[in-house]
Amino acid sequence: MESTSSSEDASATEPPIVPEYPTSFIARIKRVILGKPRDIKDPGIFHRISLVAFFAWVGLGADGLSSSAYGPEEAFRALGEHMYLAVALVLATAFTIFIISYSYSRIIEHFPSGGGGYVVASKLLGPRYGVVSGSALLIDYVFTISVSIASAADQIFSFLPPAAAQYKLFLVTLSIVVLMILNMRGVKESVTVLMPIFILFILTHAILILGGIASHVVDAPRVITEVQTGFANNYSTLGFFGLFAIAAHAYSMGAGTYTGIEAVSNGMQIMREPKVHTARRTMLYMSISLAATAGGILICYLLFNVTPEAGKTMNASLLERFAGGWEFGNLPVGSFFVMISLVSSAALLFVAAQAGFIDGPRVMSNMAIDSWLPHRFRVLSDRLTMQNGVILISIAAVLMLYITGGDTSTLILMYSINVFLTFTLSQTGMIRFWIGNRNRDADWSRHIVIHIIGFALCCSILILNLFEKFHDGGWLTILLTGILVGLCAVIKSHYEVVRTHLSRLDDILTEIPTVATNAVPSRLDKKAPTAVVLVSSYGGLGMHTFL
């Protein structure tokens, strides 16, 4: 009886919670697709939408890791008959990954609120450099989605009859729509759905790389001899600079391998507290997995003497040479493994597009806060997601796919230029930061070294890419970035004009009498409805409305 009476007392004192249901048909459909609104008063809401290091590695690391599906291949193809240089290429690739990753870990420490290259350039180099870096990042994230989805489609359609290729654009468009809906529901939900794909890729490629190297342990002396002989023969005919030019060309052609490294610094808002620790651990996971996968694939190309074949990726050729002949009884286990591995690559490329949906809208939000983009892009939806940014970047990715006809080669050519433009600006900003703080930090010279090395690497790759890819599509990337920078300048100018007019309006309104001098104050009625006037600052417009 006591429990009953106490429950009755509680129900009498607490107002009943009436669930809100959408009334219109469109609102109900939206609720089913996107989910119910988040309760911003829930103290555990951030815990449920933030990511620990492992999930952040899945959501953001897939962008970098998926580049192993095409980055090492582009680099190895560029070597031509000089395959022995793959050893140097592996070392250069791993070194570059760790240098860029470590330098961005340092950036994360100094900019724990996120923003990546845009915030670094804006704060350390100035707003003009910031808008260039931000615009380059936005174009890059559009290409991240386009390249990843198009490459995934290529993997899938390689198993289908040639006549099915006519449906490629429809499939990639549908894929982008699915990812758009997942991200409009919320980041953590989309990462949870995509996690099994990521794990499958890791497992299949670990078997490929470790098994491929282990199967050639007995051939190590032969391979070492071939590498030494090839290097000695070509050194005598081409000289040091000739070999260096070939290696540098292949190194720059593999620039796509490094394109997803910055994603963590742009996604700080979704990291679980402590954010800096979580982000640095995520960066560590990403760098180790990317270096091991890209370097391992290059080594396996050399060990298995893989050469380009028409209608196949070099990864497909490598898998067939590694496992194509496996049988268990009469079952073609090897063929099944090859198929699963290629499907996992295609699926991971699909996951990699997720980084564009996570980080692209966040860069838009940072730029909107600074009035380079419309302010609506800084507003969260009722699901606490940046739906406006997600929708816009989805539309842009679909348009880019239709402009290029979904051709992966064309998209890849246009992809890496903006990445290294942002990398270069970020490293420049950090160099300037440490020079300016040399009197405040005794270890400034030790800190600046990593950014000087990073600047040298990133600037070299940027120059090589501009020189080699300008006529193959690089010009379009530069044009699109320039147009976006100009558009941002127009939007910024508009907000400056509006701000000036509002300031004048404040001056006018503050001079207008609000009440008569002989007015009698009205008595406060606590039961009367309450009005709320939202203002962005203390000014004449808000005060005049209030009074």
Image: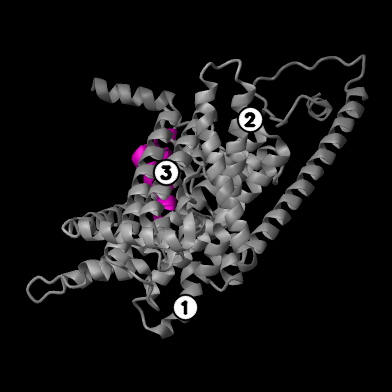
Q: Secondary structure at mark 2?
A: helix
Magenta segment boundaries in residue numbering: 45-66
- Residue placed under numbered mark 2 in the picture: 432
Question: Residue 92, percent across and down?
Answer: 42, 48
- Residue placed under numbered mark 1 in the picture: 167
Residue 357 appears in the rendering: yes
Residue 391 appears in the rendering: no
Which of the marked residues, 1 or 3, is nearer the chain's N terminus? 3
Question: Residue 401, percent across and down?
Answer: 56, 68
Q: Secondary structure at mark 1?
A: helix
Q: Is residue 404 above or below residue 526?
A: below
CA distance separating discs 2 and 1: 50 Å
User: Which quadrant holds the N terminus?
Assistant: top left
Which of the marked residues, 3 or 2, is nearer the chain's N terminus? 3
Question: Residue 334, percent across and down?
Answer: 19, 70
Name the front one of labels 3 and 2. Answer: 3
Q: Is residue 63 above or below residue 83?
A: above
Name the front one of labels 2 and 1. Answer: 2
Which of the marked residues, 2 or 1, is nearer the chain's N terminus? 1
Q: Which mark is residue 95?
A: 3
Front one among 499 and 207: 207
Residue pictured at 49% horizontal, 35% vertical: 103
Q: Amino acid at mark 2?
A: Arg
Residue projecting furthest to the bottom? 163
Q: Is residue 305 above or below residue 538?
A: below
Horizontally, is 277 left or right of 400 in the view? left
User: Which quadrant holds the C terminus?
Assistant: top right
